Each structure stands twice: as C-alpha cells, then as structure tokens.
Amino acid sequence: MPSAALRENPSTSVERAVAMLDAIGSRTNGMTNAEISRHLHIPKSSASYILRALERSGYLRRVESKYRLGLKLLSLRHSALEGLNVREVAQPHLRSLADRLRQTVHLAVLDRDEAVYVEKVDASNFVKVDTWIGRRISPHSTSVGKAILAFSPAEELSDWLDGRTLRRYTEFTLTTPTGFMAEMEKVRRQGYAVDDEENSLGVRCIAAPVFGADGRVQASVGVSGITTQVSVNDVPRVAADVVQTAARISRNLGYVKLRSDA
C-alpha cells in the first residue's frame, strides 16, 4: 500500500513544495527536515518525501543534513529575469547612480502583492545593505514598494489595500489604511517615496517610479543606506538624483511624459 506521502493530494504536494522552497530560500544557512516540518506544520514523513524529490530534481541540495537551494533554480531565475526588459535597460543607469551617491541601488517590481528586487548595484564603500536579487519585501514599509503602489491605478491600489493587515516591522511602520493612503498622496505629490526606518531600524531608503511605453508604472529605482550615510537633510538631494535616474530609464523604455501627467 502507498505511504501517506504518496497518497497525498497532488495539489497539496505542489503547494508544500513551493512553500518549502520559499522557506529554505529565506534562510542563509538552510533548514533541516525537522525545521521545515515544524515551520510548515506538516508531518516529517511528508516533508522528507517532498524534500528528496526536490533534491533529486536539482532544486535543492543537502549539506550536512541541511537543505539549501539548488543550482537548478539559478537557471529558472535567469529565465525569469531575462523577460524583464526594464532590468536590462535600467542596469547602466543604476550603476551610474550608485557611483554618484556611493550607496546601494535597487530596481524593484511588484509581483503577487509583494515588491521584489530584480537588480542590485552595490556602491564602492565599506557599508553594504543586506539585500539580494529575488528578495521579496512588503510594499507598505519600503520606498520601492510605495513608489510603485502610489503611481498604480487607483482601483489597483484600493484592491491591494482592501482587507489587508499592514504588518509592523519597526515603530515607524505605517500600519493604518488612513495613514497609508495619506502617504500615497504625499508620494504622488512629491514624485518619490521615503522609507524612514520603516522596514529596518537604522536604514533609510528613497525611491522613484519607472514607467513603461504604455504609461503604466513598471518598476521603481531605490537608494538604500544607513541613516548616518543618508541623513534627513540629504533626502531632497538624493531624491532629486533618484527621480532623474528613474525618468531616464522611463524614457529609454519609451515613456513620454504628457502635460496631463504633471
């Protein structure tokens, strides 16, 4: 008779496999079978069966009893990123911005209600921001996310916010719908978004939207640095450079700013 793991609903197995990849990908040091079982609240036997299947397929590798993401995922990531034309267009502009400001620069897109870093350029200084390409973050607490949401169509923004719990990451995180919508209006008015220690204490980020040829926001460009590097007084100067960089990328993508856009 087949084991319980083999008798499991195929759709459930797929959902668990995806959840495992997400969980393992969020841990720098990987996870054991037992840790995954506890984290996802599933039997160890079921977890073991799926983990072995993912390992055989190359999506996971096992190092000293801990599972880590496998090299097979690199090819998938490459294929996914290749389809993002904005990334290719933006790269030289991001490098130039990072060199000028000597700060870490990101390009982010909105995917399944989360902001995702699709490109990162580190500055040539000694302080690095602990982020990576593929990292998924909450839009409401990050400048790159707020810059995209603020310039999305009103009904899309409303749908995103409807019934959502705005998680608190620091004492400065916006957690009420009223406060968040007021922030969206401010971002639209000034043309850029600021994450003032809202996602991580000691880190300040500034971002501006990137538009495609169809006039819709496609991505955002953000600069991140510790608060001693990017002071409150620095924000207007840095924001002006970020906005200009985002505008250059937008023009390269075919975006033409109309008088009514102002």
Image (tube, rainbow, N blue to C red):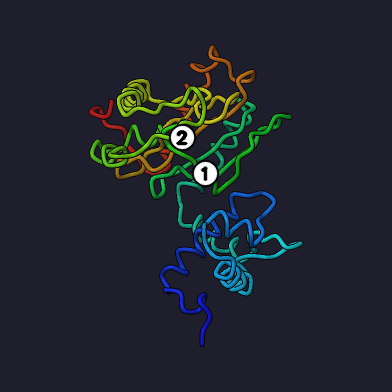
Could you tell me which secondary element the residue under label 2 belongs to? Answer: helix
Q: Residue furthest bottom?
A: 1
Labels 2 & 1 near each other (Cβ < 8 A): yes
Image position of 22 with respect to 214: above or below: below
Residue designated by label 1: 117
User: As rendered, which of 34 and 24 lies closer to the eye?
Assistant: 34
Q: Earlier in the sequence, mark 2 or mark 1?
A: 1
Q: Residue at x 63, y 30 (%)?
A: 99
Marks 2 and 1, Cα distance to the nearest angstrom?
A: 9 Å
Is residue 10 placed above or below 214 in the rendered structure? Answer: below
Residue named by callout 2: 144
Q: Is residue 236 left or right of residue 58?
A: left
Q: Residue furthest top?
A: 233
Question: Is 207 on the left or on the right of 113, as rendered?
Answer: right
Number of numbered labels in the structure image: 2
Image position, residue 7 (x, y; %): 46, 79
Which residue type does callout 2 highlight? Val
Nearest to the observer: residue 68 or residue 104: 68
Q: Residue at x 48, y 22 (%)?
A: 172
Q: In the image, what residue type sits under mark 1?
A: Tyr
Is 150 positioned to the left or the right of 234 in the image? left
| Location of residue 48 (image quadrant) | bottom right
Tell me the element at label 1: strand
- x then y, percent, for residue 28: 67, 49
